[in-house]
Image (cartoon, helix red, strand yellow):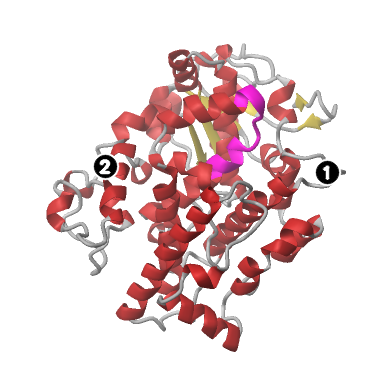
Amino acid sequence: MIVDSKSHEVLQATIYNLGSCAARCLDFSRGELWARMSTPLRHKAVQIPVFLVNEAQMDILYPPERRKAIDPERANDWREKRRNLDNPATLQDLSDWREERRYSDNIATLQDLDPPSPEDKGPNPSWSRYERIVAMGLYVCNPKASFEVLAEAECKDDSSPTGVLGFSKAEETYKHHKGPHIYLCCERIVSVAKEKGIDPNLVLDKVYYHELGHAVLKGVRCFEKPEDDPYLETWGRIIEESAAEWISYVHFRGREELLVRKVLMESAPAEYRSCVVFHRIPLFPLPMAEPKKWDKIIQWGIRSGLRRFYEGWMNHWMNLRFPMRLCPDMLSLVEGTLLEDWVKSLRQQGLPRGAFFLFFDYLFLSLNRLISGPISLFYDVISPADPFWEIERVTTNPGTTIRPRSRLPFFLAGFNLSAWRVYKELGAPREPEYVIPLEEFAAALIYFSL
């Protein structure tokens, strides 16, 4: 049990040392670790046990299919190729990247970001560069106890730091606990902190919040069929990691925020860095049309329209001195594309079957109401029971009026978080009417974060 020094509440969070000697270098009894947490993270923290592991144990636990990372240097090359629409990327330009393109259009896609490993098995070449950063923490939705993990334990005594339970209780819980687990590799946390010259407890907090963010997003390991997991797709990994990293990032303020952004994020893979624009780019409502209605030509036209929209949206955002004050006219950003036709058809026909949240046109053309209207408008998009509403309380006092410069980013971020979670709850369908907007959203996250 951990006492929150801010509210004097007792959080039933359970931390177990499953074999990490470096756990002694970290302090889990600090009030700021728990006081910073927004309500959604607190709910998950008291539900999910945390196991402290060493590097050997983490390497056993980390799923092989998730050992991927997008090298920012590769992403920069991809970005340049994506810009040049007059001379688009070709197979020769990909060199040792993928041998086949997933789509027949000649514009670089997200699949070009992932260079293949030999025979497409095991981690990709970029993983070795980012393993220590990425594999500091792990959230597993449906864990399977491995006795090999217990055999690699380096610290098996019960004399643990304050707020941490010893090995005997850790072993028992690890074997028998039903439900999600969070694993934190203390050795890597301490090592990275020492290398960067920052407090290891700050690294611990950032990693722990990130894994709790995965839990709030319903995790990436809860699919009955592994092939249904969108995390295995490049676009799915980008959105999931950007979302979890954003949830973690917004919990820090002042000097801590600067250290997280300038020190920890700059050494992370591209899909983690893209969290800096997660609150600026809107994810389109899904599906954009009734599934299985788009032919290849329409798919290409919608994809092109989405790219044009995101470019215009971000140009408008970055060129305004006060970007939260005004919202661009959506139709002007997609004029002459199939996306314009899609928007006009929605105006005439209403929502496509299966779409959720609210009318797309209303979302963008009515943002001025969001800027000047009451806070309760957030409930028009996200249910009052939705925990993402509580993330707003990280930045403002719940009893005060939210400043106009804060509303639009949190509105878009909350919308994106909920849309992504609902998509996974639907079973992550792979029809183009679902996938194309997700791919272009993920591509925009990478493109505008570099």
| Residue in the picture at 36% in, 31% down | 130
Q: Give the mark, 1 or 2, whose residue is nearer the N terminus.
A: 2
| Vertical relation: 215 (above or below) 204 | below
Which amino acid does the dot numbered 2 rest on?
Answer: Gly
Q: Callout 2: 10 Å neighbours few (<14), some, many (20+)? A: some
Q: Taken as a whole, is the magenta stretch helix, strand or loop?
A: helix
Residue 219 on image: x %, y %: 54, 49
Image: magenta residue range: 244-256
Tag 2 residue:
122
Which amino acid does the dot numbered 1 rest on?
Answer: Pro
Q: Is residue 335 visible?
A: yes
Q: Is residue 48 left or right of residue 276?
A: right
Residue in the foreground of this view, choosing between 377 and 11: 377
Q: Is residue 421 left or right of residue 101?
A: right
Question: Which quadrant of the view contains residue 292?
Answer: bottom left
Q: How many marks?
A: 2
Residue in the foreground of this view, choosing between 323 and 444: 323
Tag 1 residue:
398
